[in-house]
Image (cartoon, helix red, strand yellow):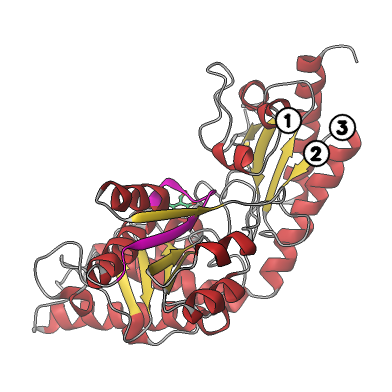
Amino acid sequence: MKPPVYLDYNATTPVAPEVADAIEPFLRAHFGNASSSHVYGRRAQEAVAQARAHVAALIGALESEIVFTGCATEANNLAIFGVAKALQKGRRHIITSAIEHPAVMQPCRRLEDDGWDRTTVPVDGNGRADLDALARGLRDDAALVTIMHANNEVGTLQEIAEIANMAHACGAFVHTDAAQSVGKIPVDVGTLGVDLLTIAGHKFYATKGVGALYVRRETPIVPVMVGADHEHGLRPGTENVPAIVGLGEAARLARERQPAMEMQLRRIRDLLHALLAEGAQGLTLNGHPEHRLPNTLNVSFPGVSGRELVHAVENDVAASVGAACHSDTGTVSGVLAAMGIGIERAFGAVRLSVGIYTTEAQVHHAAKALIKRWLELRGPA
Ligand SMILES: Cc1ncc(COP(=O)(O)O)c(C=O)c1O
């Protein structure tokens, strides 16, 4: 039996063969500790420096502004707690959006538990943050605005440059969780105007367990974990050289593949959408019709539970219903709920995310299987 078509690239991507090849020597011959001064150490150090240069180039940063971390969650924690701790004497107010990943939402809640003010900016029906609400929240005690670049469930892109302008005018710093956008679309920290930006290796063909935080020079930040002086003193712990080398190679590939990659993703994603819309009448798109990741298609199938549909189709398609969508407990995705999507439509939501290895033939197969199972589950119209 053929393996199911993988349409869950927003959960994680396969490791690119080029990335695996780049990593391999660092699992075997080049095993040195990047802090050692002998030849083994220097080889590892050079490799980390090269990876840093690739990651910096991908997002238009300086090499000295890249801090390697263990994952995007860690980068978000470092950004939020690191800046909060540096600023806590003067400013104790954090602003975020209603559709953040838990890796941002939970650190913000923790600050609130510690006595900080937290403002949560609502989003509209397409998942875009309400900038009027942001303006109302921006008081002169605001320390940090943390709003994601692209949403993991629906793919909606936020107006980060505008958000950064507004925040800076009030003296607040700006972090964006770009775990889903870096490697899929061009991301430039200068254009976005952010002070901190989170990157996740396994969302763009590197391995799991590696991420990075961009920290604009002169941003007030202190380490969250303390130990030795690695990563400009912001992230102690011996560098995971193979994973960092892989992240560097993934960044190099992403840069080389743009803009063709974005067009390819959009074409395949839109083909999938067209096939599904034709076969499943009443299908609705969740997320912004234009300002959305080129690989993400979150659609609601009418009259069925998305969770049941994903389960029914699992031999043909590997997809997801997004986070925390439990039809049995009567709760739906927090993201869709924040977008004001009604409960029935939210129950029918399925997140389909394509990647650079998704083919037209796979998309045809997946669409056929989804429509067939949808018809079976829905019963006679
Ligand atoms: C938007 C966003 N932020 C953060 C994360 C956390 O990434 P990691 O699990 O690699 O720490 C994810 C992963 O799903 C994500 O989609």
Residue 345: mark in rendering: 1
Few, some or many residues within 10 Å of mark 1 (<14, 14–19, 20+): many
The answer to which of 215 and 106 lies nearer the viewer is 106
Are discs 1 and 2 less than 8 Å apart at CB?
Answer: yes
Q: Is residue 97 magenta?
A: yes
Q: Is mark 3 within 8 Å of ligand 1?
A: no
Dot 2 falls on a residue whose secondary structure is strand
Residue that appears at 62% across and 37% down? 337
Residue 280 falls in which quadrant of the image?
A: top right
- The residue beneath circle 2 is 284
Q: Which residue is mark 3?
A: 282
- Disc 3 crowd, CA 10 A, few/some/many (<14, 14-19, 20+): few
Q: Which mark is residue 143?
A: none
Magenta segment includes 337? no
Q: Position of residue 262 (x, y in %)?
A: 69, 67
Q: Position of residue 160 (x, y in %)?
A: 58, 70
Q: Mark 2 is on which residue type?
A: Thr
Q: Mark 2 touching mark 3, by CB under 8 A?
A: yes
The magenta stretch is: 91-103
Q: Say few, some or many: other residues with alpha carbon within 10 Å of mark 2 (under 14 / 14 to 19 / 20 or more).
A: some
- Between 54 and 145, the residue placed more toward the observer is 145
Amino acid on which the number 1 mark rests in the picture: Arg
Q: Position of residue 294 (x, y in %)?
A: 69, 60
Is tag 1's residue or tag 2's residue first in the polypeptide sequence? 2
- Residue shown at 86%/39% (left/top)? 277
Residue nearest the viewer, comparing 134 with 375: 134
In terms of sequence position, does the residue under pointer 1 or pointer 3 come before the other? 3
Left or right of 239, for residue 364:
right
Residue at 36% x, 62% y: name it. 93
